[in-house]
Amino acid sequence: MNDKGGGSGLVILLILIVALIVAFLAVKNMSSLRSSSAPGVGETGDSVQQAQSLVDQINQLQQQAGQGP
C-alpha cells in the first residue's frame, strides 16, 4: 500500500482542468467586452470633438491666468 505520487498526479490533472476552464472563460469574457465596447464610426468623431473642446477650454483658462489683473 505504498502510493508514491498517485495522488499528486491527480491533483496536477485537476489543477490543469481548472486552469483551462478559467482561461476559456477569460477569453470568452474578453471577446464579449471587446465587441460590446467598440465605438462606432460616429462615436469616435464625437470623442475627438469633446477632447478638442476640453483642450481649447484649458488653453483659454491658462491664457486668462497668464494675463492676470
Image (tube, rainbow, N blue to C red):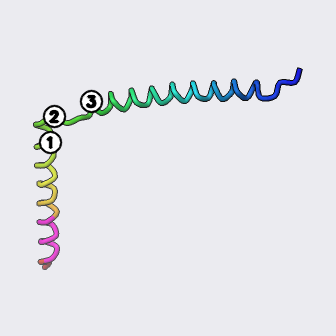
Q: Is residue 38 magenta?
A: no
**Tag of residue 40:** 2
Q: Is residue 63 magenta?
A: yes
Q: Is residue 19 left or right of residue 52?
A: right
Query: Mark 3 = which residue?
Result: 35
- CA distance for labels 2 and 3: 11 Å
Camera-near label (3 vs 1) is 3
Q: Is residue 23 left or right of residue 18?
A: left
**Crowding at mark 1 (Cα within 10 Å: few <14, some 14-19, many 20+):** few
> Observer-nearest residue: 63 or 6?
6
> Observer-nearest residue: 18 or 50?
18
Q: Quadrant of the N terminus?
A: top right
**Residue located 40% across and 30% down the image:** 27
Region in magenta: 59-66
Q: Position of residue 20 (x, y in %)?
A: 52, 27
- Considering only order in the chain, which callout, 1 or 3, is on the residue closer to the N terminus? 3
